[in-house]
Amino acid sequence: MTPGATIFVVSMQAVAGPENADPDGRCYDLLVFARAATEAEAEAVAHRGLAQLGWIEAQALRSGEITDPDAVPDDFRRSFETAQAVGCAVIVYDEP
């Protein structure tokens, strides 16, 4: 883990592009958990992670640092832990 890095949650919107696992071309709301030292770095990590997964036209809407890991709800725990381990995790909301 990068010194000073923590986990941020970045609320985003992106289009499922042609290289996406489900390339339907629709815009989705996403939560991206990103390991970074700053909010700006977290947004950059989120953009890179989405691009690698075939998301296009990604826009960061807002972001915030997780300051109390014990307060992460159970349904987000796996994404939080994945971001700690590999740097990024994405939750896609079913309805665009």
Image (cartoon, rainbow, N blue to C red):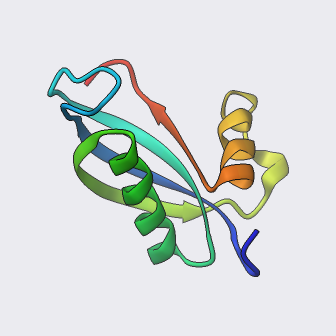
| Image position, residue 14 (x, y; %) | 26, 42
Vertical arrangement, residue 82 with respect to residue 44, above or below: above
Q: Is residue 5 left or right of residue 8?
A: right
Write the residue at 22% across / 45% down: 56
Question: What residue appears at the point 44 percent right and 76 percent down from the top-left corner?
Answer: 40
Name the quadrant containing residue 89: top right
Residue shown at 18%/31% (left/top)? Answer: 18
What residue is at 80 percent from the left and 53 percent from the top?
A: 69
Split into 4 quadrants, where in the image is the N terminus? bottom right
In the rendered image, which quarter is residue 22 located in? top left
Q: Of residues 27 and 50, which is closer to you in this image? A: 50
Q: Position of residue 85 (x, y in %)?
A: 74, 51
Name of the residue lying farthest toward the left: 25
- Where is residue 33 drawn, in percent x and y? 57, 50
In the picture, the quarter occupied by the C terminus is top left
The answer to which of 75 and 3 lies nearer the viewer is: 3
Residue 24 % position (x, y): 18, 20
Nearer the observer, 54 or 47: 54
Asked if residue 84 is positioned above or below residue 74 in the image, the reply reads: below
Picture layout, residue 91 above or below residue 14: above
